Image (tube, rainbow, N blue to C red):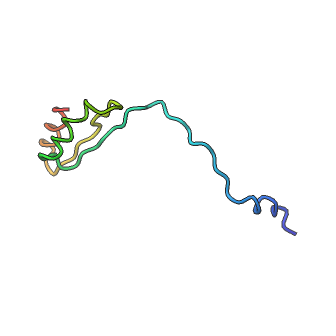
Amino acid sequence: MNVHADDAAKGPTMTDPTPTTQTAPGWAVLGPGSIARRFLSQLPASERDARLVAAGSSSAERAGAFAAEA
């Protein structure tokens, strides 16, 4: 006898996602070249106040310089 037969018949359940308090998206950039700089220049104009949260490069100095531009 399956005591959980009724539960199995209902199928999987879904819950509402937990809302977060952060509304602005954070972006990470890998390879801070000319395309990334163009992208970075547009962040202040975004509707949701997007911001750079991380920068990565094969050179720590280049990544740091790129992040400083933000």
Q: Where is residue 49 drawn, in percent x and y?
A: 32, 30
In-image side of 54 versus 18 (left or right): left
Residue 2 is left or right of residue 19, and the answer is right
Provide residue 41's location: percent of width, then percent of height: 18, 35
Image position, residue 14 (x, y; %): 64, 50
Depth check, front residue: 17 or 30: 17
Q: Is residue 45 above or below residue 56?
A: above
Depth check: 10 or 65 in front? 10
Residue at (67, 57) in percent of width and height: 12
Using residue 41 as the reference point, say whether residue 12 is left or right of it. right
Viewer-side residue, 45 vs 67: 45
| Residue that extends furthest to the bottom in the rendered view of this protein | 1
Residue at image coords 16%, 32%? 69
For the image shown, how many numbered marks are present on the structure? 0
Camera-side residue of 38 and 53: 38
Above or below — where is 27 with respect to 5? above
Quadrant holding the C terminus: top left
The percent position of residue 1, horizontal first and vertical second, equals: 88, 69
Q: In which quarter of the image is residue 39?
A: top left
Q: In this view, does 44 lie to the left or right of 59?
A: right
Q: In which quarter of the image is residue 64?
A: top left
At 84% across and 67% down in the image, what residue appears? 2
Q: In this view, which residue lies farthest toward the right?
A: 1
